[in-house]
Amino acid sequence: MSLFRRDKKEVEVICTFCKGTGRDPFRIMSPLSTCYVCGGKKKVRVASPNVRCSYCWGRGVSPVGARNACLACGGIGFIPGGNNTETCPKCSGTGEDKNGLYCLQCHGSGRAIPLAI
Ligand SMILES: [Zn+2]
Ligand SMILES: [Zn+2]
Ligand SMILES: [Zn+2]
C-alpha cells in the first residue's frame, strides 16, 4: 500500500543524500551502513511537481549538524510544491529562519505558498 494518495503524481529520483550509492554518506555506523533516507534503494520517490529545497540548497544534508539529513526535505533535496515562483516573504527565499532552522512558513522551499507535507 502506498503512503501517497493515488491522485498525487510522483517521480522517482536518485537519492540526493547518498548520491545513489545506497550507503550512509557519512558512515556514522560503519562504511557499510545503509542510507537511511532511501533505505539502501538508491532511489527515492518525490511528489510532482516539486521544488528544490532552499534550506539545504538541494543537497539533502542539513546545514546545521552537518551529518544529518535535511529536516525540511528529509534528505531528498526536493519539497512537494506547485509551480509557484513567488519568494517566501518570511525568509526571502532562503528557506531558513532567523534561528538557522528551516522556515516554517514555506517549509524550507523558499516559495510563498506554504506546502503541506
Ligand atoms: Zn540514499
Ligand atoms: Zn533540504
Ligand atoms: Zn520561507
Image (cartoon, rainbow, N blue to C red):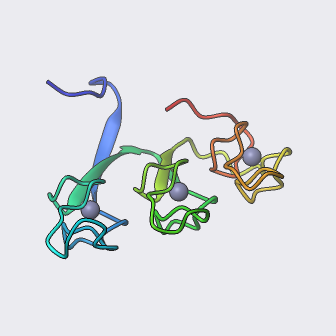
Above or below residue 1? Residue 46 is below
How many labels were placed on the picture? 0
Above or below residue 77? Residue 73 is above
Residue 12 occupies quadrant: bottom left
| Most foreground residue, 5 or 74 | 74
Task: Where is residue 79? Give x, y as percent.
Answer: 50, 47
| Left or right: where 69 falls relative to 63 | left
Task: Where is residue 34? Give x, y as percent.
Answer: 18, 61
| Residue occupying the point 55% across, 47% down | 72
Residue at the outermost front position? 29
| Residue occupying the point 40% across, 44% down | 48
| Residue occupying the point 24% across, 54% down | 38
Q: Quadrant of the N terminus?
A: top left
| Residue occupying the point 78% across, 50% down | 97
| Most foreground residue, 51 or 34 | 34
| Left or right: where 59 falls relative to 84 | left
Residue 32 occupies quadrant: bottom left
Task: Where is residue 99? Give x, y as percent.
Answer: 79, 51
Residue 10 occupies quadrant: top left
Task: Where is residue 2? Give x, y as percent.
Answer: 20, 28
| Most foreground residue, 95 or 34 | 34
| Left or right: where 95 falls relative to 62 | right
| Left or right: where 109 falls relative to 73 | right
Above or below residue 69? Residue 81 is above
Q: Does residue 14 appear in the picture of this structure? A: no
Q: Does residue 51 appear in the picture of this structure? A: yes
Above or below residue 54? Residue 6 is above
